[in-house]
C-alpha cells in the first residue's frame, strides 16, 4: 500500500484524504492518505520524516506552497511559472514539485460550470500561493484584463511581470480606482477559512460572477454570501477546483485519470 499525505496549517478541514481515497477506489488502487499539521518553517523536517516512513507523494496546502517550491530538486513548467507547489513526488530520490491549482480551477470553471475567461475582466482578491498558481491558466484563457488586489500590495505587484494585462492594488488604493465593474471576481484570500471578509465594496461585485477558492460544508462561504447579498449573478465555491486539482495530481502519481464528477457529487451530498 502506497503512503500519501497533505501538509499544511490548518489541516483538520482538508478533504484531500477522502478525495484521493475515492479516486483510488475507482481505479482499484490501495493507498493510505494522511493529514500532517505543519507550521511554516517545518516542512523540510516533516517531509524527510514522511519519506523515511515510505511516503511517496504529497499535497501541500496553505501556507506552505512557496516553502515547498524552495525545497524541490526538480520542478514542472507549471510549478516554475507559479513559483509555488501543491503536489510533490519523489523520482529516483529527487523531489519533484508541480502546481495543479490553476489547471484545477480552469477545468472546474470551464468544464463543470461552462464559464469562459475569453475577453473577461477578472478581479482576483489575494496574492498568496493559490493566486500564484491560477494566474497562468487564467491568462491562457485570453481575458481582457486581470486586476489583483492584496493586503500587502508588493505581492500583487510582483505578479504584474507575468503579463501587461495584469494590474495590482492594495485594498485601500483600489477603493478609489475606476477599474470596476468586473465579469468575474475570484476570492483567493484565506479570509473565508478565517470566517472573515476582506474589506470589499459592493460596487465591485454588481452583476459579476463570484468564485471563492475556499469551501464550507453545506453552506456558502462568507464571500459567496456577501457576493449574493450585493448583486452577484452567481457564486461558486472551491470544492470543484479542489477535486479537479486533486485529479490532476492523482494522474501524476498513479498514471490514471479518475472520474471527478462522481466524487464531486458525493462530496456535495455529504456521502464522502
Ligand atoms: P496563502 O496563505 O498563501 O495566502 C493567503 C492570502 O490571503 C494572501 O493574499 C493574504 O494577504 C490574504 N489574507 C489573509 N488574511 C487576510 C485578511 N484578513 N484580509 C485580507 N487579506 C488577507 O493561502 P493560499 O493562497 O494557499 O490560499 C488562499 C485561499 O484559497 C484559501 O482559502 C484556500 O483554502 C483556498 N484554496 C483553495 C484551493 C482549492 O482547491 N479549492 C486550492 C488552493 C487554495 P497578504 O499576502 O497580504 O498576507
Image: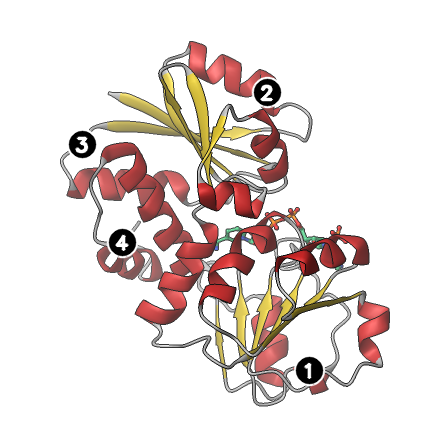
Whichever of labels 3 and 1 marks the residue nearer the N terminus, that label is 3
Marks 3 and 4, Cα distance to the nearest angstrom?
Answer: 16 Å
Residue labelled with disc 3: 29
Residue labelled with disc 4: 263
Which label sits in the foreground, 4 or 1?
1
The picture quadrant where one finds residue 190 is bottom right
Q: Residue at x 40, y 42 (%)?
A: 16
Residue 28 shown left or right of residue 75 in the figure: left
Marks 3 and 2, Cα distance to the nearest angstrom?
Answer: 28 Å
Residue 207 shown left or right of residue 94 in the figure: right
Marks 2 and 4, Cα distance to the nearest angstrom?
Answer: 31 Å
Up/down of 225 relative to 13, above or below = below
Q: Residue at x 49, y 40 (%)?
A: 86
The crowd level at tag 3 (other Cα within 10 Å; few <14, some 14-19, many 20+) is few
Marks 2 and 1, Cα distance to the nearest angstrom?
Answer: 40 Å
Residue labelled with disc 2: 44
Whichever of labels 3 and 4 marks the residue nearer the N terminus, that label is 3
Q: Is residue 224 visible from the viewing direction of this image?
A: yes
The picture quadrant where one finds residue 103 is bottom left
Q: Residue at x 68, y 82 (%)?
A: 204
Residue labelled with disc 1: 204
The crowd level at tag 4 (other Cα within 10 Å; few <14, some 14-19, many 20+) is many
Foreground residue among 222 and 79: 79
Amino acid at each position: 500500500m502506497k503512503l500519501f499525505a497533505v501538509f499544511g496549517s490548518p489541516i483538520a478541514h482538508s478533504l484531500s484524504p477522502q478525495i484521493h481515497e475515492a479516486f483510488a477506489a475507482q481505479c482499484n488502487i490501495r493507498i493510505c492518505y494522511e493529514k500532517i499539521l505543519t507550521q511554516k518553517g517545518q516542512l523540510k523536517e516533516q517531509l524527510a520524516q514522511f519519506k523515511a516512513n515510505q511516503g511517496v507523494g504529497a499535497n501541500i496546502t496553505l501556507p506552505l506552497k512557496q516553502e515547498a517550491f524552495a525545497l524541490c530538486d526538480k520542478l514542472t513548467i507549471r510549478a516554475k511559472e507559479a513559483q509555488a507547489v501543491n503536489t510533490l513526488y519523489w523520482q529516483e530520490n529527487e523531489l519533484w514539485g508541480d502546481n495543479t491549482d490553476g489547471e484545477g480551477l480552469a477545468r472546474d470553471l470551464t468544464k463543470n460550470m461552462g464559464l469562459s475567461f475569453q475577453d473577461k475582466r477578472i478581479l482576483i482578491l489575494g496574492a498568496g500561493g493559490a493566486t500564484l498558481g491560477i494566474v497562468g491558466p487564467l491568462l491562457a484563457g485570453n481575458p481582457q484584463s486581470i486586476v489583483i488586489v492584496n493586503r500587502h500590495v508588493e505581492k500583487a505587484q510582483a505578479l504584474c511581470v507575468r503579463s501587461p494585462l495584469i494590474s495590482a492594488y492594495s485594498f485601500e488604493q483600489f477603493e478609489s480606482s475606476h477599474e470596476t465593474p468586473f465579469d468575474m471576481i475570484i476570492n483567493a484570500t484565506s479570509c473565508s477559512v478565517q470566517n472573515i471578509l476582506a474589506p470589499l465594496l459592493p460596487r465591485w461585485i454588481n452583476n459579476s460572477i463570484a468564485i471563492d477558492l475556499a469551501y464550507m460544508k453545506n453552506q456558502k462561504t462568507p464571500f459567496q454570501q456577501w457576493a449574493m447579498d450585493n448583486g452577484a449573478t452567481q457564486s461558486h465555491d472551491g470544492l470543484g477546483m479542489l477535486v479537479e486539482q486533486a485529479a490532476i495530481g492523482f494522474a501524476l502519481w498513479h498514471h490514471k485519470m479518475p472520474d471527478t464528477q462522481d466524487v464531486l457529487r458525493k462530496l456535495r451530498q455529504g456521502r464522502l
